[in-house]
Amino acid sequence: MPQMSERGEAMPASPIRKLVPLANEAKRKGIKVYHLNIGQPDIHTPEVGLNAVRNITREILEYSPSEGYKSLREKLVSYYATFNINISADDIIITTGGSEAVLFSFMACLDPGDEIIVPEPAYANYMAFAISAGAVIKTIPSSIEDGFALPSFDKFEALITERTRGILICNPNNPTGYIYSKEEMERLKEIVKKYDLFLFSDEVYREFCYTGAPYVSAFHLKGIEDNVVLIDSVSKRYSECGIRIGALITKNKALRNHVMKFCQARLSPPLLGQIVAEASVDASQEYLKNTYDEYLARRNFLISGINAIPGCYTPMPMGAFYTMAKLPVDDADKFCAWCLKEFQYEGQTVFMAPGSGFYTTPGLGIDQVRLAYVLNREDLAKALVVLEKALEAYPGRKL
């Protein structure tokens, strides 16, 4: 058999999806599985987006421009302006989901062996995209005890080497729900300026900020416009994960030219997805407010429920729709698999993402799970009961 690549061997399995076969087997046995493992919203896609699909009259589904349709990019300019993010259509490149935006930004900015600094826990696919680009992720641990606040800036500077090319943040954060303050963002700006680094800023969850404080985008930071690479997606705000439409936004013309080479190689972002996304920008304020209010209520319900279970703790997430929870277990990977393979309560079980997959530092996250509050409150209530029963029955429970 031919030998596989070292890159393939190094690619991490997704902590979000690696247990899917166990979940599928549980379902085959007739067990109800509550999916807390993945950020797949259950909120309905806006009707304007669905109608855009229903009303397609094209006779040919052709390639779009490699950078995406100008009409969509122009509409996004108006959308970003509502957040005081001032850009032009030429600054926006439409990508096949936010994932491709991350990958293309890494491929365009980083050479093999170059380093990116990322606070952890972090979205697991960042590691996979870095490996694909031949780059190295250097992580700085944050602590559940202080709500996963940004680590001290001395720790950032201690990791900077001659190979460091950028800092990557997710704001609001997946998987922790933390939101970086204006002061934290300004301090990041100073490091970026001092060492002439890229600031990769994943801002997919900007609609879901629950603190009332003004949202601070990387593009609000003055003096580093050419250093900022903003990552975005329509997946979460419009419940459109399946259309695979994201955006890479930069004012750096040289970087844009480099990214366009990768875009041209993959030819075109999804045509139908762009049609849906463009229509969805016109989703009503009522739709957006109802979505926000629902996630806020779910957050409050889930966090209260988790912290009421003996031995469990999770801080109150400030945004997005995830939380990292500490459980009284010996190994969350084993516990999550056990819940799907060996446990059920009244024909039900829970599917969670093991926390260790969101860390690169050995030993961290071993007793943590990421939970996504993308179920209605009735199902969240049932999932909490099942989780408490599972913890009572689990052989590896820590007293």
Image: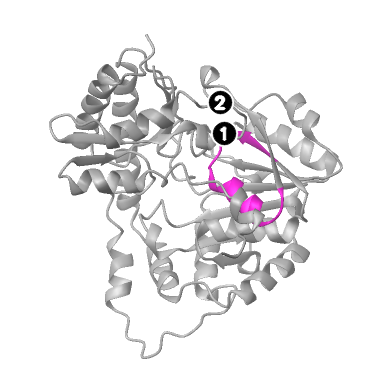
Position of residue 138 measured from the top left corner of the image (x, y, whole percent): 70, 37
In the image, 80 versus 14, the foreground residue is 14
Pick the quarter of the image with the N terminus: bottom right
Residue found at x 29% / y 78% = 55
* In contact (CB < 8 Å): disc 1 and disc 2: yes
Position of residue 242 measured from the top left corner of the image (x, y, whole percent): 38, 61
Residue type at mark 2? Leu
User: Which residue lies most toward the right here?
Assistant: 162
Visible residue check, residue 85: no
Indicate the secondary structure of the residue bearing disc 2: loop
Which residue is identified by label 1? 359
User: Which residue lies most toward the left here?
Assistant: 346
| Label 2: few (<14), some (14–19) or many (≥20) C-alpha neighbours in 10 Å | some
Visible residue check, residue 177: yes
Separation (CA) of disc 1 from disc 2:
6 Å
Query: Residue 364 has which mark?
Result: 2
Stretch in magenta: 117-135
Q: Say if the magenta span includes residue 90.
A: no
Residue found at x 72% / y 32% = 187
